[in-house]
Image (cartoon, rainbow, N blue to C red):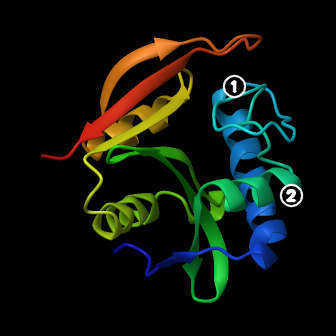
Amino acid sequence: MPAMIAVIKARLEDAETLTEVQRRTFDDDSRRFGGMSGGGPVPHATVGSGGPPGYDSVDWTLWAMKTGIYYKILAGDRIIGGVILFDMHKRHFNLGRIFIDPDWQDQGIGSQALQFIEKTFPFVKRWSLDTPERAVRNHHFYKKLGYVKVGEEVPEGVDIRLFLYEKRIP
């Protein structure tokens, strides 16, 4: 049975906890699926040197809260994850990041969170995201939720290939 969660707007005072959950999540991914750890306060939502840029930076988290639409995922009153969205305009949102604490993964929480997001923004007809080629588990997750791979790219100055996914809502 999936865990009971709540998805609510993050507040600035949540930044340190959300950064810690991101650090745990992406460091765990790097250990399990190959890659490097480390990030930095890079203000965009693609993948950098292991974890996404800024995943371990409170400054980046605060930037994302001010620039995007940032939700926290709660189990009871404990923050166990987050979702960051960017409005690309013309009914297109980018799923900049979703992360679930490693201790809470494989319980359907990510699926519940993204279903909530889609219901919260019914006017969005195009969802896009990128994820590292090596993150095979992510590919399965996004495909299960109706995302389709639409391309690949290697960001300048980075030694990682990103797979680009989209989900179109009729």
| Residue at (77, 54) in percent of width and height | 63
Tag 2 secondary structure: helix
Among numbered discs 1 and 2, the one appearing first in the sequence: 1
- Rendered image quadrant of residue 118: bottom left
Q: Whole-percent x and y of residue 87?
A: 48, 49
**Where 116 sits versus 93, above or below?**
below
Q: How many marks?
A: 2
Q: Is residue 11 above or below residue 105?
A: below
Q: Position of residue 130 (x, y in %)?
A: 50, 31
> What type is the residue that disc 2 sits on?
Val
Name the residue at 25% across, 47% down.
125
Q: Which residue is mark 1?
A: 34
Q: Is residue 134 above or below residue 117?
A: above
Q: Residue furthest bottom?
A: 76
Image location of residue 92, percent across then percent down = 36, 44
Along the line of sight, the residue nearer the viewer: 20 or 65: 65
Residue farthest to the front? 90
**Mark 1 residue element:** loop
**Residue at image point 47% right, 37% down:** 138
Q: Which mark is residue 145?
A: none
- Residue drawn at x 72%, y 34% is 30
As drawn, 155 above or below 75:
above
**Along the line of sight, which residue is nearer the eye, 166 or 93?**
93
Taking the image as shown, residue 111 lies to the left or right of residue 26, namely left
Mark 1 to mark 2 CA distance (whole Å):
25 Å
Name the residue carrying label 2: 58
In the image: residue 102, left or right of residue 15: left
Name the kind of residue labelled 1 in the image.
Answer: Gly
Q: Residues within 10 Å of mark 1 (few under 14, many from 20)?
A: few
Residue 104 image offset from top left, x and y in percent = 57, 65
Q: Give the quarter of the figure containing the N terminus.
A: bottom left
- Dot 2: few (<14), some (14–19), or many (≥20) neighbours within 10 Å? some
